[in-house]
Amino acid sequence: MTAPFAFDLLATDGRARRGTITTPHGVVRTPAFMPVGTQGTVKAMFMDDVRATGADVVLGNTYHLMLRPTAERVAKLGGLHRFANWPHTILTDSGGFQVMSLAQIRKLTEQGVTFQSHIDGSKHEMSPERSIEIQGLLGSDIQMQLDECLRLPASRAEIDRAMRLSLRWAARSRQKFEAMGGPGLGQGLYGIVQGGDDADLRATSARELSAMPFEGYSVGGLAVGEPQAVMLAMLDIVCPLLPEAKPRYLMGVGTPDDIVESVARGIDQFDCVMPTRAGRHGLAYTRFGKINLKNARHADDPRPLDESSDCPALRDYSRAYLHHLVRTGEALGAMLLTWANVAYYQSLMLGIRDAIEARRYADFVAETKAGWARGDLAPIG
């Protein structure tokens, strides 16, 4: 039997937490940002470079991988770790968000969702049990229950209905996870708190999920268009209701500012396509804030994005060259800026962890935000 999934809380500073998650494929240092590897790849990056930035875990997408190359094919080829050449921890989402947002035609029932692929129109079914089966075939270390994620704004009646359906699906997901032997394999299954922007429904969801034996708990249905203040208010309600001894994951978040504010409220894990997507569109995230390499003012700038960085993409290429790559549509531009962004996000997480350990998290946040606000617009030369 593999050693059980474990979360160890190592330090706190206010509600900010530093810890480790132990899985069959390694230790994840928390708070952690998980680069999104939707289809078994972090777009425009080699997996070795992803690891070199400091990432302990990447995310894979159940919906996309079930459609192609199919979970069954990945399983025959040795599982997602071997398939993607990532021998470290992998978290897979349930596929529910993509079913709701990408499928051409879908029908939701108590049993699950039937939908047509956005790729070729083929018909598929996704139930709580099927989602867990797919994630088991992929061999992910951390798996997610199937839930219904509503886009906000929505009526209270709709939010309540979706939240209670997600609770019922949570129980079914757990039953299937245990039947497939997930706990014995050292894997973890997370429940997902829903409830939209309604404080009472969020609290109900958090309390009822906490009574179920999940290895971790996620907060879903945020970062879907609501203001940051609403997201943070929901975290203020939810986090104190979740088990102290289990990891907490805020799904689909987000900007560096979202991350530092959410850590302050007790969140341990994050994922978002933002750093990779922004990199493919000419935008760099740095300790000086965002730098848009499309702007003409970078055309003659010989400075790198950050000369003090350990990452070659941030340190070794001039802004003028990056601007040239972006303006000419060269693939290397997307590669370098994606690498730079993932590296910055990981350096931010390292700074967060160190600050919590030193019990100076509030000072770290203030210093970090001051750096973003100050920017790096010094004259050239």
Image (cartoon, helix red, strand yellow):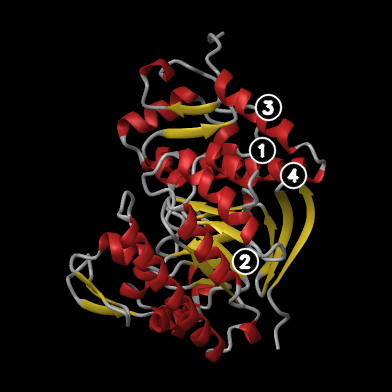
**Mark 4 — residue?**
14
Q: Nearer the viewer, mark 3 or mark 2?
A: 3
Question: Looking at the image, which residue is at 53% across and 30% down?
Answer: 317
Question: Looking at the image, which residue is at 51% across and 34% down?
Answer: 285
Q: Nearer the viewer, residue 140 or 54?
A: 140
Q: Nearer the viewer, mark 1 or mark 2?
A: 2
Task: Report whether residue 48 is seen.
Answer: no
Real-space Cα distance between discs 1 and 4?
A: 30 Å
Position of 28 compared to 271: left or right? right
Residue 55 x %, y %: 61, 54
Q: Earlier in the sequence, mark 1 or mark 4?
A: 4
Position of 221 compared to 360: left or right? left
Look at label 4 and name its amino acid: Gly
Real-space Cα distance between discs 4 and 2?
A: 30 Å
Quarter holding the N terminus is bottom right
Q: Earlier in the sequence, mark 4 or mark 2?
A: 4
Are the residues tagged 3 and 2 within 8 Å (C-beta)?
Answer: no
Q: State which quadrant residue 293 falls in.
A: top left
**Mark 1 — residue?**
310
Look at label 1 and name its amino acid: Asp
Real-space Cα distance between discs 1 and 3?
A: 20 Å
Look at label 2 and name its amino acid: His
**Mark 3 — residue?**
367
**Mark 2 — residue?**
88
Look at label 3 and name its amino acid: Glu
Q: Nearer the viewer, mark 4 or mark 2?
A: 4
Q: Earlier in the sequence, mark 3 or mark 2?
A: 2
